[in-house]
Amino acid sequence: MRIIEQFISYIQAERRYSPLTAKSYQRDLDRYGDYMSAAYGVDNLCKVSTPMIKSFLVSLKDEGLSNRSINRMISTLKTFYKYCLREGLVEKSPMFGIKNLKQPKNLVKFVPENDINKVSFENKDEYTIKRDELLFEILYQTGIRKAELIGMRDQDVDKLAMKVKVRGKRDKERFIPLSRDLLAMIGHYQTLRDERFGSHADRLLLNDKGEEMTPYFVYNKVHRMLEGVTSLKQKSPHVLRHTFATHLLDEGASLVAIQKLLGHADLGTTQVYAHNTIEQLKKIHQQAHPKGG
């Protein structure tokens, strides 16, 4: 459908959604369009009514989709019809009054501090070891996303100001402070990298061939690092992002500060970290209660 194509072009060009996100929207809307055509003979999505959409959502539930997946579809449709309103294609969004389904709140998975300190690295050549160590420490000490790590450049690191510029979702920039130890690791790695591949690198971290890292390369590295120290089923770069935020919260950082460091647009997104480990609860009890000691 042409309206879907126009919408996808809009979220990529103007909203700067990633290709992966755009593909997800495309998939959702194609499924939605197929249903409306088959169930109601409606090929123009601007002619769909609210009851039709409710019928579609019920069909997703009947197919066994989780509330989380259905809520993602609802989010897609709300964004789509907001675009249709903006373009004057509908007078009123048919999504008006449709609310998200309730879903259980899952606690964020993270690696305890004691286990983080047990991470070891494959005993290869010095360049590979120092690259892998730096890859891990940047993810854990900054909480950046996998894509943000891959896109990081030498010039993004301000050694004098002890901070790094990070390009987040939709090209939004933020600055994250760096410790002296991490800056020293970056400097040592850059020397080894330039000795091996030359000083023309466009990216800070390179793979074993001197090329830009792929998402799979980063995931595989982190998975191996965490394999021997945690029983978590998920051992991904995003787990280190969760770990970064959780450890900050446990040490007394405010949610607003964590929000800025993570690059969340909405504080509500950051509030998933507002859970306390039993160790933190014990600490609070000992400090605050008259007989806590």
Image: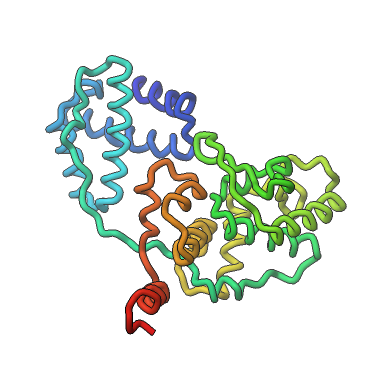
Residue 271 vs residue 253, the one in the foreground = 253
171 left or right, relative to 292: right
- Where residue 250 appears, as percent x and y from the top left, is 45, 66
- Where residue 12 appears, as percent x and y from the top left, is 47, 28
Residue situated furthest front in the rendering:
290
User: Quadrant of residue 178 in the image?
Assistant: bottom right
Residue 166 vs residue 51, the one in the foreground = 166
- Where residue 280 appears, as percent x and y from the top left, is 41, 72
Q: How many marks?
A: 0
Please determine whether, in this image, residue 224 is positioned above or below residue 101.
Answer: below
Q: Residue at x 80, y 65 (%)?
A: 125
Q: Residue at x 19, y 25 (%)?
A: 48
Residue 50 vs residue 163, the one in the foreground = 163
Quarter containing the N terminus: top left
Residue 110 vs residue 292, the one in the foreground = 292
Q: Residue at x 66, y 58 (%)?
A: 179
- Where residue 182 appears, as percent x and y from the top left, is 69, 58
User: Quadrant of residue 126 in the image?
Assistant: bottom right
Please determine whether, in this image, residue 125 is positioned above or below residue 203.
Answer: below
Colour scheme employed for the rendering of this structure? rainbow
Residue situated furthest left in the rendering:
51
17 left or right, relative to 43: right
Quarter containing the C terminus: bottom left
